Structures are given as structure tokens and as C-alpha cells.
Image (cartoon, coloured by chain):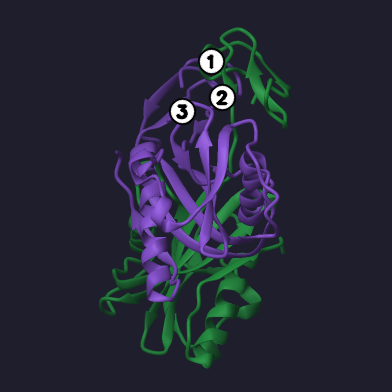
Chain colours: A green, B purple
Amino acid sequence: MKYCSHCGARVTSRIPPGDDRPRFVCDTCQTIHYENPRIVVGCIPEFDDRILVCRRAIQPCYGKWTLPAGYLENGETLVEAMKRETFEEAKARLTAVTPYAVFNLTFVNQVYVMFRGYLVDQDYGPGAESLEVKLLSEHDMPWEDLAFSVIRETLRRYFADRRNGTFPFHMGDVEPG
Amino acid sequence: MKYCSHCGARVTSRIPPGDDRPRFVCDTCQTIHYENPRIVVGCIPEFDDRILVCRRAIQPCYGKWTLPAGYLENGETLVEAMKRETFEEAKARLTAVTPYAVFNLTFVNQVYVMFRGYLVDQDYGPGAESLEVKLLSEHDMPWEDLAFSVIRETLRRYFADRRNGTFPFHMGDVEPG
């Protein structure tokens, strides 16, 4: 941030009175510009003993496998965003959705909220951001070709829980790589 | 948003190619400015059968009662933010923290993440944003003087769970008022 989005003047970075960390501040119109983490909402779409995964048609990680996920938009609930992303990326519809995990990704200022959801039917296919979409069993997971560490961590916990026969709510910190 | 924070030119609101909703776009440097919900992290600080509540020394809702809560900052985990806010507002330290609930507040573009946490000791008191801080039982809760509907909804679910003897993870949508 170099300019004030409110008045167009140059901003400076300093600690405002009563605050404890640097913010971009406009000395012309006095606006303090706060920057905060964004929420990414995603889903593990289930069907019998398989889950739906998407191969990315966009960067970063073009060609790698992922779960449907994307930014929460203003005015949207987490469930609405998760269903929207699942339809956009995998043309799939969900029922019986349950919050599953929250992950901190402090290195990119993101919080991931992951759900489990059951596919309404086997009507699915690649959306504009996917090359292909497949229902895969744990045995067939492309562990070496997953797009992001948060997806690997989600799937690792999910299959462990399924072997244990119980799905507690998870919270964790994810590192890059 | 009126000006591009990157180059200082005027922005316009329109739907970028490949997108489905209006964004502030800079036609000079081509930056698309996304606006997304913010995360507020809060806590129900427990001690025996009582919980710690704070009376607000700031607007909005000056003089009303609330739970420690505030915006998640860049670079911070949810647990770090929740402990920081609890110390800033109630000078209290927590142990044994557990995620308790997530609430959508679409009318203000916020997502609340609430924890339960146990007070390390009875060493607490008002921080700069609180007039007073008290350990109260359910019987003494100031239900008519709570600051926000999300606080009322959190406490309503919490005391119901406590009567039931179990604390499942909650997700819900909160309306204004």
C-alpha cells in the first residue's frame, strides 16, 4: 500500500496512538488502513468411501491436485462459500455439510475453514479452474502431487479419522511446502 | 474505496473478466482490489462455574458487557489472537483452550471464532478498553446489557451446553440486534 484508498494521498507506515503495531496511515484524511488475514473455505466432498479431488487448471500449482476451496466473499456465509466453490471447481452439489477443521497459515495471512460434505449425486465435472475432477479412494490419492500443504494436512487427518471411525473438529497450524 | 492504493489513480467498480461480482479495479495499473470478511477471535474465560465478562470502555456499546474478542492480525494464529485479546481487555491468562463456535455475521462482513479457555488464576482486571471485569455465574449474567448479538448467542449456547454436560462445536448465523 502506497496511497490512501480514501483520498489518494501518500500513506506512511507507523504505529497509531493507542495501537501496538505499524499500520498504513493517511496524514491527509487521517484514515488508518488495517490489513487482516483472509478466510479460505474448502470442502472434502464424500461419496461412499471415495472423495472428490480436482486437478488445477490455474497457477499456482497448475496440474496439481486439490480440494474445492476459495476466498470467502463479503455477504456470504462459510457454508454458502464452500458450496459455491465446490460447484465452481467441480460442478458438484453437497448435502449434510459439517465443519471439519480450521488451519492457520500465518505465512500467507490466511485461515482455512474446511468442511466435510456428502455429494448429492455423481453429477460432477471440471469447472473453469479445473483440468479434471475425480472420485478417488484413499489408496489412489496422489499424495506426491497435491497442490498445497494445507490440502495434504486436511487429507492426512481426514483418512486417519475415518480409520478411527470418528471425526472430531480439528485446529492446527500449517507450514509452507 | 475511491483511489488505487498501489498507484493513486481513481478506481472504478466493475466485474473483472472471469469474475462474477463487482470489484474496485484500477484502469491505470490494472490492480484488482478484493475486499473480504474479517475474522474476530474471542473467548469464554472459565473459572469453576463462572465466566469472565468485561464492561466496555469504548464505543460501540460503551458500558455494555462483552467477552474478550478482537480482530485477528496478520501473522497471528487464532489462539495467539484470542490470548492477546483476553490479556488486553481483561488482564487474564488462559490455559486449556478449545475451539467452541464459528458465527457468520454477514451484515458486517465478519466471521467470529469463539474459544473456551480456563483461567490460569484469579489474577484479572480491566485493560484500557474495559471499565470493569467480573467473574459471573449464569444466574448473574447481565442478559439485558450485553454488547452484541453474537455475544448473547455464544453465551446462550454455552450455558445450554453446560447444563447438558457436553460441548459440541457450533456453527451459526447471527443477525444484528
Residue at mark 3 shares a chain with residue at mark 2: yes
| SS state under label 1 | loop
Query: Quadrant of residue A156 in the image?
Result: bottom right
Distance in Å between CA atoms under marks 1 and 3: 39 Å
Quarter of the image where one finds residue B161: bottom left
Q: Position of residue A129 (x, y in %)?
A: 44, 58
Q: Amino acid at mark 1?
A: Ala
Q: Position of residue B24 (x, y in %)?
A: 44, 28
- Which mark sits nearer the N-terminus, 1 or 2? 1
The residue under label 2 is which amino acid type? Cys
- Chain that bears disc 3: B
Q: In what element is the residue under mark 2?
A: loop
Report the residue marked by disc 3.
B62
On the image, numbered disc 2 is attached to which residue?
B29
- Taking the spot 54% from the left edge, 53% from the top edge, the residue there is B43
Rendered image: mark on residue B9: 1
Q: Nearer the viewer, residue B145 or A150?
A: B145
Query: Is the same chain shared between marks 1 and 3?
Result: yes
Chain under callout 2: B
Q: Earlier in the sequence, mark 1 or mark 3?
A: 1
Same-subunit check for callouts 1 and 2: yes
Q: Is residue B17 above or below residue B111?
A: above
